[in-house]
Amino acid sequence: MGLITLIEAATPHLEKRSTASKTTSFVVISSCGGFERLFPVVASPYTTFKRAQATIARDYVRKLGPKGIRINTIIPSVIENPTITKRDGTVELSTSQIIARDNPEFVTNSLAKVPLKRFGKPEDIASTVLFLTSGMAGYISGANLLVDGGQTLTL
């Protein structure tokens, strides 16, 4: 699995860094689709792989911790991505925008299940990564952190 290869390849570099800094960290991005009955991905390989990512990360806590490396998983739900402007100037809709265009009822129903009444933004995930990789999260390792606006509580 690619995640195992990535962790194994990054570990020697992170070990060197951990001797100079006490905030060395690895963050895995998974998906609520692997844990909750969201979207039409239920019973697909996607759900299995996303769940496996979090399990693999937790398994590595015991191996990486003594080397000074923390590992955590972020589990986001729906993230509204912006349009993509290509180098030639053409604009491409993001996956979330295509879904909103093609299935507005699905989006409305999904949004109604989010207590914060909005979908996530890329900045929400980036801020979470920043926190988990900072010294402020220096004692957090092996966590599966939901970033979902409370959506999974309503499922």
Image (cartoon, grey):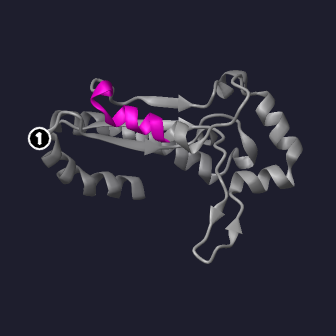
* Disc 1 secondary structure class: helix
* Residue at the extreme right of the image, as rendered: 105
From the viewer's side, name the closer residue of 140 and 66: 140
Q: Quadrant of the N terminus?
A: bottom left
From the viewer's side, name the closer residue of 49 and 154: 154
Q: Residue under label 1, please give it.
A: 20
Across and down, in percent, residue 94 comes to 68, 57
- Say if residue 58 shows up in the picture: no
Report the magenta stretch's main SS: helix
**Quarter of the image holding residue 72?**
top left
Compared with residue 105, is residue 62 higher up or lower down, i.e. above or below? above
Question: Does residue 44 appear left or right of residue 60 in this picture?
Answer: right
- Count of numbered circles in the view: 1
* Residue at the extreme bottom of the image, as rendered: 88
Question: Does residue 55 appear left or right of residue 91 in this picture?
Answer: left
- Say if residue 154 shows up in the picture: yes
The amino acid sitting under disc 1 is: Ala
What residue is at 63 percent from the left and 62 percent from the top? 84
* Residue at the extreme left of the image, as rendered: 19
Across and down, in percent, residue 149 comes to 63, 27
Crowding near pointer 1: few (<14 within 10 Å), some, many (20+)? few
From the viewer's side, name the closer residue of 122 and 3: 122
Across and down, in percent, residue 110 comes to 78, 35
Compared with residue 70, is residue 104 higher up or lower down, i.e. above or below? below
For the record, the magenta segment spans 126-137
Across and down, in percent, residue 51 comes to 53, 41
What residue is at 61 percent from the left and 41 percent from the top? 121
What residue is at 84 percent from the left and 42 percent from the top? 106
Q: Quadrant of the C terminus?
A: top right
Q: Is residue 129 magenta?
A: yes
**Quarter of the image holding residue 115?**
top right
